[in-house]
Image (cartoon, coloured by chain):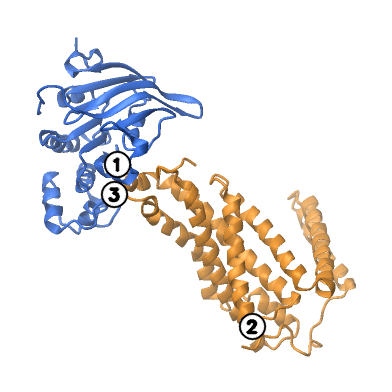
Amino acid sequence: MPHTEGPAPELFELVDVSFEVDSRPVLSHVSDHIHEGHVTAIVGPSGSGKSTLLRMLNRLEEPTSGEVRFHGVPLRDLEVHELRRRVGLVAQRPVMLTDRVDSEVRVGAPDLDDDSVDRLLEQVSLGHLDRDRLPEELSGGEQQRLALARALAVGPEALLLDEPTSALDAKSAKSVDAVVRSLIDSGLSVVLVSHDLKRAASLTHDALVLDHGRLIERGDPAAVSYLGGS
Amino acid sequence: MTAIPLLAADTSTANIPTWWGVAASAALVLVAAAISWRERLGLERDVAIAATRALVQLAAVGALLLFVFERGGLVAAFGWLTVMVVIAGFVAGGRAASIPRSRQHAWWAIGIAVGVTMGLLLGLGTIDAVPQVVIPVGGMVVSTAMVTAGLALQRTADVVVDQRARIEARLALGLPARDAFLGPYRTAMRTALVPTVDTTKVVGLISLPGAMTGLILAGVDPWDAIRYQIVVMYMLLGAAFIAAVLSARFAQRVLFDDAERLVRL
């Protein structure tokens, strides 16, 4: 896991962010920052607003009040397609969108050449797959890794991972974890929502702890009490 | 192009029921009510209401048609069509009330479908520009456009719910909303339009369509009636596709907000 020397530049800044659904608060006045080149975990109990916060980072959700900034620029001022290409998102359950493995990698990058597709599939340990396999027939772990390759194909500078292994069995989860670790080692900025505290603590530089939509703790995972730190 | 005549010159072979004949046919309503009573279905009251409503509604429409045919002219005929479009939009839009402004989308889609179809047929001289033709033919177009627009809107609402994860997965890759929605949109359109296409495929084989039946009953030569029916089927096919695609495309504009997020239905 790479550690940057000195303070890392800010990737995202959350400024007094609140979010409501039908007048029910999901996030309340969350202010914090997420560093570039870091792996940041968003942890907390079910329903604490973790996934909502993650989805706000590429504007799949919009704060009811407050503001999210990317490299200091409010998300509203960025062209939304460009933002989403720079900030990839991999959902909890993989959703396959095409009928071929290579087409799946090209969903967001239709001009990608065969060599690049091969390289991406190798990167997520799927180099062995026939390119014309039906993605729906792959195992859950393979589908999730294919979803990772699909997100990487667009060339993001940050990747948002919404509990990418929670819907998988232990063996599949391990295979996805290995890929995530290699991405982290390559220096990609990663924001990870996880319910697995041990996993979050072992993977990340920073942890944000949410409870009932409020940010109750943040810092080095080793020092965050929610993760068993001191 | 010569307009297809609505009626043959000689309609003397047609046996149009008199009002006494209508009264006699009411015996069948009594039969229906008697069956309901005998089998304890509890539908006697509904049968009575349905039969009375049919009589009153059709009599009112008949009186109105008589007025329009004799005195209203084409202006009244198109006014009639406009009212039908308004009612049809209300019904079709109501099929997908979860979609914001669904009735508005249905009104526009049905209105344009009717305008294009009738405009083409009248413009090319395929049908006569007289109230006796404009109202019944237009009514068929409105009815088909209403059903397909309603289905298209309903299926669109369904795919937004069922395929939300797929749409958002594409949005998250930076695809424009229109591209992200393309697959689910096509699924919705196929589902909405297959019934119309299938009906056109089997016309004459398993069903004798209304326009043709009506013309034959009125004494028109079957060959002429069939020509008329072919025009009607092609017209309805066109109207169905226009209404379905437009209603879904109009709806799509409110399914995504300014930041191209899929709204929750």
Mark 2, residue position:
B125
**Relative to B45, A156 lies left or right:** left
Three-letter residue code for mark 2: Gly
Which chain is painted in orange?
B
Three-letter residue code for mark 3: Met
Compared with A211, A102 (above or below) is below
Q: Quadrant of the rendered structure where residue B233 is?
A: bottom right
Asked which secondary structure carries label 1, the reply is helix
The one of B155 and B81 positioned closer to us in this rendering: B81
Question: What x and y, as percent, mark residue B16?
Answer: 82, 78
**Relative to A149, A46 lies left or right:** right
Q: Nearer the viewer, mark 3 or mark 2?
A: 2
Q: In terms of sequence position, does the residue under pointer 3 or pointer 1 come before the other?
A: 1
**What residue is drawn where x is 53% and y is 66%?**
B242
Question: What x and y, as percent, mark residue B256?
Answer: 44, 46
Q: Quadrant of the rendered structure where residue B225 is?
A: bottom right
On residue A96, the disc is 3
Question: What x and y, as percent, mark residue B130?
Answer: 74, 78
Labels 1 and 2 in the same subunit? no
